[in-house]
Image (spheres, helix red, strand yellow):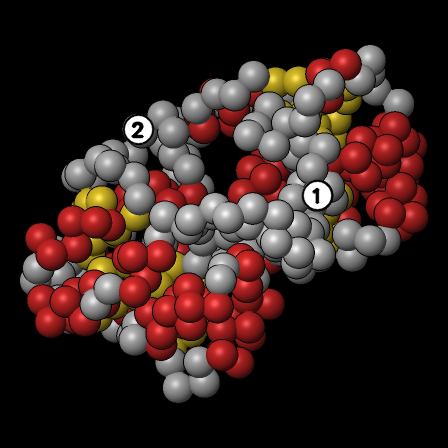
Amino acid sequence: MGVERFKIIFLSEMGFEGKIPPNHTNMRTEFAWMNALNADHKNLHLFEQVRDYDFVFLILPKGKLNLSAEGSKIADIPNPVSNLYASNFIDILKQNNKKICYVQEGPNWWFNDYNIVDQFNFYNILSKCDIIFSHNEIDERFYKGLFPNTKVESIKTLLIEELIKHIKPTKENKVIIGGNFARWYGGFQSYIVANEFNCEKWAQESHAKRELEHNIPDLNHLRRMPWAGWMNTLSTFKYAIHLMPTVAAGTFSLNCAYFGIPCIGNIKVDTQRYCHPELSVAVDDVQKARKLANRLANDKDYYELCSNRCKKLYKEHYDLKLWKQRMHNILS
């Protein structure tokens, strides 16, 4: 038996209860994990109802911050997770279940902007967990440094292909930018470099879309849509660029690799580095990103090399069967 033999539940701030079917139309990364592990889900605040599981996977909410980019206080905004972090919910979960696993949510530094009490409470929560699952290898080293006596593993980003396996990419002459014009996404830099492709430029609409961003005359925006619709739309693009400085799950690079879309992006993100090795850059190295974009646009052989290689590397590193086997080995 594989990883399915374990009884697993995910707890997060989402309100639904139950399992994620393979034909779920919004198969984001956390839903893909739940589906692959045949896991249940319940709202985090119902933790006292969670009993007799082999593994409880915690996706803790990020909470709210009240600091500027340079660390100056800008508002008195209460952190909605403070009471939870100060409670003994981990102890209760450990009394009623076998193992507790923390799953990274967002960049590893996020808790650094909490107030001092919340920072230490967050640290104490993670110190009580049996396993810490990180997004990337760089995050893995971060947590191993903080918790040298705790098992730390990366939980690889994952695609469930059930709803997209029929899609045949069309590769129209246009480029997709991975985020909006906010520091989190680095959309401005991506937009500037995207000019090298000399074709239509598109970006996704998200919570980070800036006021007046829609007035940029040569930038089109995709409406927000469920994951399956997004993947269908993504399959029509020829190029991608994502100079996002925030190191997180890396779904954009992985989605592009699945369709063989060469993506220029952050070398610290595992999905980018493993699937698009020739196109991975330090996000501050805009000069190199521009040179790569120019080569992709003007060297047909180089484009085909990158396109074919990222599809191949996706299967080598992120195939569902490999993901399940790896998780089985970790949990065993």
Name which residue lies at 17% across and 38% down: 17
Secondary element type, mark 2 = loop
**Place of residue 137 in the rendered image (x, y in percent of width and height, measured from the top left):** 56, 67
Name which residue lies at 17% across and 39% down: 18
Q: Amino acid at mark 1?
A: Arg
Q: Amino acid at mark 2?
A: Asn
Tell me if residue 270 can be seen.
yes
- Tell me which corner region of the image, top left, top right, bottom left or bottom right, holds residue 138: bottom right
Q: Which mark is residue 23?
A: 2
Who comes first in sequence, dot 1 or dot 2?
2
- Tell me which corner region of the image, top left, top right, bottom left or bottom right, holds residue 180: top right
**Place of residue 304 in the rendered image (x, y in percent of width and height, measured from the top left):** 76, 37
**Place of residue 40 in the rendered image (x, y in percent of width and height, measured from the top left):** 19, 47
Q: Mark 2 and mark 1 in contact (Cβ < 8 Å)?
A: no
Name which residue lies at 28% across and 57% down: 84
Residue 208 relative to residue 40: left or right = right
Q: Nearer the viewer, residue 59 or 166?
A: 59
Secondary element type, mark 1 = loop
Farthest residue, direction bottom: 149
Name which residue lies at 38% across and 80% down: 150
- Tell me which corner region of the image, top left, top right, bottom left or bottom right, holds residue 184: top right
Q: Nearer the viewer, residue 154 or 139?
A: 139
Q: Nearer the viewer, residue 197 or 282?
A: 282
Residue 223 relative to residue 202: left or right = left
Farthest residue, direction front: 76
Residue 270 relative to residue 156: left or right = right
Circle 1 sits on which residue? 183
Tell us which disc is closer to us: 1 or 2: 1
**Place of residue 79 in the rendered image (x, y in percent of width and height, measured from the top left):** 41, 51
Q: CA distance from mark 1 to mark 2?
A: 34 Å
